[in-house]
Image (tube, rainbow, N blue to C red):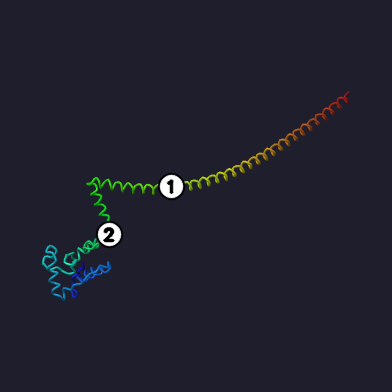
């Protein structure tokens, strides 16, 4: 199958030239084999193009403008329909060509095929059962993968929990050590305060005893003096 692109090499329209370059450049980028057929210098090409473009695709004046694209004898479309197909990633379908494996269009077609098979399976119980079994196996495999992933997550969680517990234990030990040091310091301070208080009490008691001794001595002296005065008076 050969893609035919009808174009006018000597066209005076800048818009037509740009459209032709876009089509040819994109086909080259896709590595699609094509043949350029000039309608400006070849009357047969121009007549063949006009005759094979469907009537409903022709403009109101009946003269289709280039570029026009064909797959052998089958009409594909003009620039506007080509541009729409390019935007929708359906250029190969537009050209009537199978998309290469791995292309966006091939992946999209595969998804559509899967969706169609799923719709057909709903109408056919046997196919539905078969698809259900296949999906069940896939689901079981997915569950096993999820189970392995879950076990890995659990191990990671346990490791993080173990690390967290070790860090908490270390923090608690440090806190206990600080608390013990603080309590020991407080006990030492209390002992020092008790010793100081005890020393003050002893000093006060000694001072009180000393004052009492001095007072007793004064009273004895007064009694002696009074006795001597009485003896002298007699």
Find numbered disc 2 in the image and state the secondary structure of the residue it sits on: helix
Quadrant of residue 198 in the image?
top right
Residue at left offset 61%, top offset 42%: 180
- Residue 186 as seen in the image, left or right of residue 123: right
Q: CA distance from mark 1 to mark 2?
A: 37 Å
Labels 1 & 2 near each other (Cβ < 8 A) = no
Mark 1 and mark 2 lie on one chain; the one further toward the N terminus is 2
Estimate the x, y position of residue 204 in percent, counting from the top left.
72, 35
Mark 1 nearby-residue class (10 Å; few <14, some 14–19, many ≥20): few
Estimate the x, y position of residue 78 in percent, counting from the top left.
18, 65
Q: Please say if 103 is above or below 186.
A: below
Q: Please say if 207 is above or below 166.
A: above
Residue marked by disc 1: 151
- Residue 145 as seen in the image, left or right of residue 16: right
Residue marked by disc 2: 106
Q: Which quarter shows the N terminus?
A: bottom left
- Residue 38 as seen in the image, left or right of residue 217: left
Say which of 158 and 106 sits in front: 106
Residue 43 circle label? none
Residue at left offset 57%, top offset 44%: 173
Furthest residue in direction top, as rendered:
234
Estimate the x, y position of residue 129 in percent, counting from the top left.
27, 45
Q: Which quarter shows the C terminus?
A: top right
Mark 2 nearby-residue class (10 Å; few <14, some 14–19, many ≥20): some
Q: Please say if 205 is above or below 64.
A: above
Furthest residue in direction left, as rendered:
61
């Amino acid at each position: 199958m050969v893609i035919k692109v009808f174009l006018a090499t000597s066209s005076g329209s800048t818009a037509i030239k740009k459209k032709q370059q876009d089509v040819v450049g994109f086909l080259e980028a896709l590595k699609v084999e094509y043949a350029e057929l000039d309608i400006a210098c070849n009357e047969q090409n121009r007549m063949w193009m006009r005759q094979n473009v469907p009537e409903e695709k022709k403009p109101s004046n009946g003269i289709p403008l280039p570029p026009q694209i064909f797959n052998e004898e089958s009409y594909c479309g003009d620039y506007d329909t080509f541009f729409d197909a390019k935007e929708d990633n359906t250029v190969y379908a537009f050209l009537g060509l199978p998309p290469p494996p791995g292309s966006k269009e091939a992946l999209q077609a595969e998804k559509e095929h899967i969706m169609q098979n799923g719709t057909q399976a709903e109408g056919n119980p046997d196919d539905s059962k078969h698809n259900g079994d296949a999906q069940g196996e896939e689901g079981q495999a997915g569950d096993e993968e999820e189970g392995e992933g879950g076990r890995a997550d659990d191990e990671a969680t346990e490791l993080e929990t173990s690390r967290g517990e070790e860090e908490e234990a270390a923090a608690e030990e440090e806190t206990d050590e600080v608390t013990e040091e603080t309590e020991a310091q407080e006990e030492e301070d209390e002992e020092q305060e008790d010793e100081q208080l005890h020393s003050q009490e002893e000093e006060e008691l000694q001072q009180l005893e000393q004052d009492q001794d001095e007072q007793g001595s004064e009273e004895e002296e007064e009694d002696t003096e009074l006795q001597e005065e009485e003896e002298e008076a007699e």
